[in-house]
């Protein structure tokens, strides 16, 4: 399938390294508002065509799937543009800036019959089922508590500090904590409490989020743009606990009893990088005429944005 990349920034380059190793994919086109930047990106990452206009690339009849890799602040605009040109879309997380935008994209996707999905990679990975299977097996008993964290030293990245580019920890790294919770605990939430530390520019630099479920379970999520955290996801039950290494790209799963003895180790299947799964599933869904992914429905992307809207509203 001919893949086109809309936006020639850092994440586009990282993902393109995986695309080049996928035999199912042709790195067909890249577009930037700057043609020289697009040409440089195409040369470096093996794309056949470079465009200095998003509209021009989307008018290319050979483009079969568009990966949107622009800042969060522009996702809504660029997904709409893809839908208007009847091009299937795989859009980087966070899906949009807010839930209203997400709902509008979901509506347009359904109305026009165009495939749209959020490129939040843990949703598509085999590790997701491995984690769920271990939890449902009862090996750690009645699971009541989840903690998850993701922090990187990215405070010096310009877009992270800019409110006009939808900067801040929540939309960039916190979305993974929220996603991890929703994937494995669901969304029957009673209430959410949070605390925030803001940067000088007014975006969130670090936050702690506590989520209370109606059935008594609780999740605690922490994120920051200032430090490197261990990135673990931990499930606690009355028979033991399970540690997932790296919540945004799980590398292994270890299960311990109540005496802290390792009772089971689960390897995660070898992969190119983990990015390949979102493209493979999107390509399969498009070939079947589907308008959304099986791994993350558009309603689930909307739900994530609703939760993050609620969290940010509490910080005002």
Image: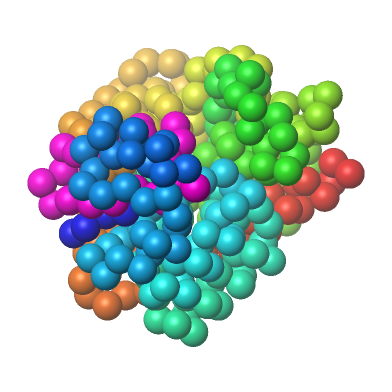
**Residue 145 location, x and y as percent?**
58, 37
Residue lying at 40% horizontally and 62% vertically, measured from the top left? 56
* Residue 43 position in % (x across, y down): 25, 34
Q: Measuring 63% from the left and 33% from the top, which residue is drawn there? A: 159
Q: Is residue 259 above or below residue 101?
A: above
Q: Which residue is at 27% across, 30% downward?
A: 44
Q: Is residue 287 above or below residue 42?
A: below
Question: Residue 96 occupies which quadrant of the picture?
Answer: bottom right
| Membership of 7 in magenta stretch | yes
Say whether residue 26 is magenta.
yes
Q: Residue at x 24, y 43 (%)?
A: 47
Query: What's drawn in magenta, residue-wise?
Result: 6-33
Residue 125, image x and y in percent? 31, 45
Judge by depth and name the residue closer to the eye, 69 or 271: 69
Q: Nearer the viewer, residue 162 or 143?
A: 162
Is any atom of residue 297 visible in this view?
no
With 236 as the anchor, is 42 left or right in this view? left
**For residue 151, side relative to residue 56 (left or right):** right
């Amino acid at each position: 399938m001919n893949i086109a990349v809309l936006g020639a920034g850092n994440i586009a380059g990282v993902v393109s390294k995986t695309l080049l190793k996928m035999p199912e994919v042709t790195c067909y086109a890249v577009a930037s508002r700057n043609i020289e930047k697009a040409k440089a990106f195409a040369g470096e990452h093996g794309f056949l065509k470079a465009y200095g206009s998003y509209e021009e690339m989307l008018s290319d009849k050979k483009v079969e799937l568009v990966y949107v890799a622009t800042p969060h602040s522009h996702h809504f605009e660029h997904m709409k543009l893809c839908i208007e040109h009847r091009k299937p879309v795989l859009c980087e997380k966070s899906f949009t800036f807010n839930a209203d935008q997400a709902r509008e994209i979901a509506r347009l996707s359904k109305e026009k019959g165009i495939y749209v999905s959020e490129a939040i990679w843990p949703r598509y990975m085999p590790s997701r089922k491995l984690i769920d299977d271990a939890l449902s097996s009862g090996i750690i008993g009645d699971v009541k508590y989840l903690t998850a964290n993701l922090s990187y030293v990215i405070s010096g990245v310009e877009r992270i500090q800019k409110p006009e580019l939808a900067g801040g920890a929540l939309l960039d790294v916190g979305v993974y904590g929220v996603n991890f919770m929703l994937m494995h605990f669901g969304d029957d939430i009673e209430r959410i409490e949070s605390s925030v530390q803001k940067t000088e520019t007014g975006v969130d630099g670090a936050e702690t989020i506590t989520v209370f479920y109606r059935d008594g379970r609780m999740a605690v999520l922490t994120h920051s743009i200032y430090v490197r955290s261990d990135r673990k996801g931990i499930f606690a039950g009355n028979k033991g606990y399970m540690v997932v290494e790296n919540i945004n790209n799980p590398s292994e799963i270890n299960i311990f009893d109540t005496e802290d003895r390792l009772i089971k180790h689960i390897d995660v299947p070898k992969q190119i990088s983990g990015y390949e799964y979102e493209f493979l599933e999107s390509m399969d869904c498009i070939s079947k005429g589907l308008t959304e992914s099986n791994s993350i429905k558009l309603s689930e992307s909307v739900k994530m944005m609703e939760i993050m809207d609620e969290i940010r509203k509490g910080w005002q």
